Amino acid sequence: MAKNFKDLSEQEILALAISSEETDARIYADFAAGLNADYPATAQIFSEMEAEEDEHRRKLIEDYRRRFGEHIPLIRREDVKGFVHRKPVWMIRPLGIKTVRRQAEIMETETRRFYERAASRVSDVSTRKLLGDLAEAERKHVTLAENLQHEYVTPEVEAQEEKAHRRLFVLQIVQPGLAGLMDGSVSTLAPVFAAAFATHSSHAAFVVGLAASVGAGISMAFAEAASDDGSLTGRGKPLLRGFVCGLMTTAGGIGHTLPYLIPEFRTATAIAVVIVGIELLVISWIRKRYMDTPFLQAAFQVIVGGVLVFLVGIWIGSS
């Protein structure tokens, strides 16, 4: 059971402060290590923050020794009620620059409040002054981070970091999503329109399209998740990629399947054809926006392939 903060002794408060500073320093070190490859300037900021936390820890240990001796009991945040649970850094890799900056702000705010409450709980003048100084230091950490950012993150470096962030987004989200959307939109055209023209039944076309879309989504999700673990390619967590790919595959097929909820076959088919055209244009735009493919080239490649599959479906269904 976690202990209430108000029930801690002064010795326990200091021990908690020491372990908290040690934890924060290691978190900042993890941030720096995790960002160094893609965001070296921001990694330097967190290295500076780590040094600050180490200095705070040193001062706290000196004060603890003065009052209570050499042995420092291990008291952690999770042993005390009221602290925010922090997900271990190794569980949220690859790190994003916005994620770590937001996490750092939360850490600084929580630590400042802790020192303010701790200072009001202790009677020793020197310890109270130390805790008050540390609360003020945490309050200034935001300013420190801003100053370090101005020092290390120049406009050129910021542009490089944004480029790296965009590259990671493309690798981890856009590529699997685009692959799924293309597969779902194109591969399901043949069975949907084959069923539609073979039966002239909106219901039959909808059932076939729904089955093809969901089945393709499940298949693509497993295929993408099993393709690689992301450790060497930088493509991120396989489960996330699989989910994105499977979801977009299903969405791509469902788009031109939903019109067949309309009972009148000709109307449903006309709307489905329009939606197919919109899907192919959206895929072309995504390829231009994120894959740097010229729009006309992307449109030609996607539309030609889509039209061929569409015609095959009609031909088979009408035969």
Image: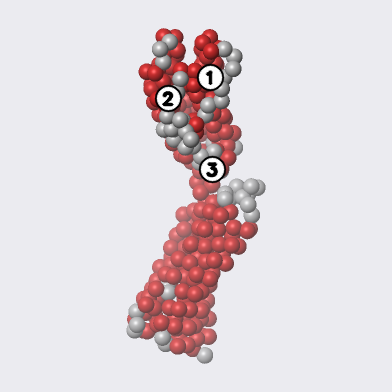
Eye-nearest disc, 1 or 3: 1
Q: Which numbered disc flags the more N-terminal residue, 1 or 3?
A: 1
**Label 1 sits on residue:** 57
Q: Position of residue 135 (x, y in %)?
A: 41, 20
Q: Does 44 sit above or below residue 119?
A: below
Q: How is the image coloured?
A: secondary structure
Q: Position of residue 95 (x, y in %)?
A: 53, 41
Q: Mark on residue 303?
A: none
Please state the horizontal and vertical placement of residue 296, each as a whole percent of the image: 47, 63
Between the C-alphas of marks 1 and 3, the distance is: 26 Å
User: Could you tell me how far apart the alpha carbons at marks 2 and 3 are, in whole angstroms?
Assistant: 34 Å
Cβ atoms at labels 2 and 3 below 8 Å apart: no
**Type of the residue with mark 1:** Arg
**Residue depth check, mark 2 versus mark 1: number of the one nearer the observer:** 2
Question: Where 5 falls versus 232 (above or below)?
Answer: above
Q: Secondary structure at mark 3?
A: loop
Query: Residue 7 has which mark?
Result: 2
In this view of the protein, can residue 296 be seen by the observer? no
Instruction: Check disc 3: other Cα within 10 Å, few if <14, some if 14-19, many if 20+.
Output: few
Q: Residue at x 39, y 18 (%)?
A: 121
Task: Tell me, yes or no, whether the two marked residues, 2 and 1, touch with CB atoms within 8 Å.
Answer: no
Q: Residue at x 42, y 69 (%)?
A: 255
Mark 2 is surrounded, within 10 Å at the Cα level, by few (under 14), some (14 to 19) or many (20 or more) other residues, namely: few
Q: What is the distance, in whole Å, between disc 2 and disc 1 at their CAs?
A: 23 Å
The mark that comes first in sequence, 2 or 1, is 2
- Report helix, strand or loop for mark 2: helix
Position of 28 with respect to 197 (left or right) is right
x and y percent of residue 238 in the render? 58, 54
Residue named by callout 3: 92
Disc 1 element: helix
Residue 161 in the image: above or below residue 6: below
